[in-house]
Amino acid sequence: MTTRYYAIPAVTVKNEETAQILWDAFTLSGTGCHLQSAKYSVKSEIPTKDKNAFPLAFGVSEGVIECEAEIIQCSNTEPTITAGEGWHISDNPKATNPDSDCPTWTVTLRRYLVKTVPSTSNVGD
């Protein structure tokens, strides 16, 4: 049996009580704009075979890291979010309270993981 997998890149989480941009998911610019929160998740799908949704024994598909970020804007300058290398913005930034003195913006980014298929494999791995 050949083992296929999605490798999750190494990440460093600082021991700080502030939101952090991990895996260089994006850059944030704009005077008075600050990262309020960031939630990261690693997901994959198990393909289904029949109407009873029994999982296939051999596959996991579409490994992805997702980042949901919240930015606070405390000036007249809207935030500029640029996706990092290998990332793309899946939900464009939008203000959730545009009439506030300090609007909050949300954005979702994704990075699809590359499936690794070893050239050789031991039986039963």
Image (spheres, grey):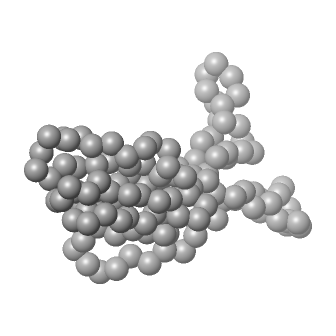
| Residue at image location 17% in from the left, 59% down from the top | 74
Residue most toward the top?
51
Residue depicted at x 22% and y 65%? 32
Q: Residue at 54% across / 74% down in the picture?
A: 10
Note whether 11 is above or below 89 in the view shown: below
Residue that appears at 38% across and 76% down: 13
- Left or right of 7: which side holds 3? right
Quadrant of the rendered image containing residue 51: top right
Looking at the image, residue 49 lies above or below residue 62 = above
* Image quadrant assignment for residue 1: bottom right
Looking at the image, can residue 39 be seen? Answer: no
Q: Residue furthest bottom?
A: 15
Classify residue 77 as left or right of residue 118.
left
Q: Position of residue 22 (x, y in %)?
A: 43, 69
Q: Position of residue 72 (x, y in %)?
A: 22, 56
Residue 82 point in image, percent of width and height: 47, 59
Classify the position of the C terminus by image quarter. bottom right
Left or right: 71, with 118 as reference point: left
Q: In terms of depth relative to the viewer, which is nearer, 23 or 53?
A: 23
112 vs 102, left or right, is right
Q: In the displayed image of the protein, which residue is found farthest to the left?
A: 101
Q: Position of residue 62 (x, y in %)?
A: 64, 46
Viewer-proximal residue, 65 or 70? 70
* Furthest-right residue in this view: 120
Q: Quadrant of residue 69?
A: bottom left
Q: Is residue 48 above or below residue 7?
A: above
Is 22 situated above or below 112? Answer: below
Q: Count the labels in the image.
A: 0
Res. 88 visible in picture: yes
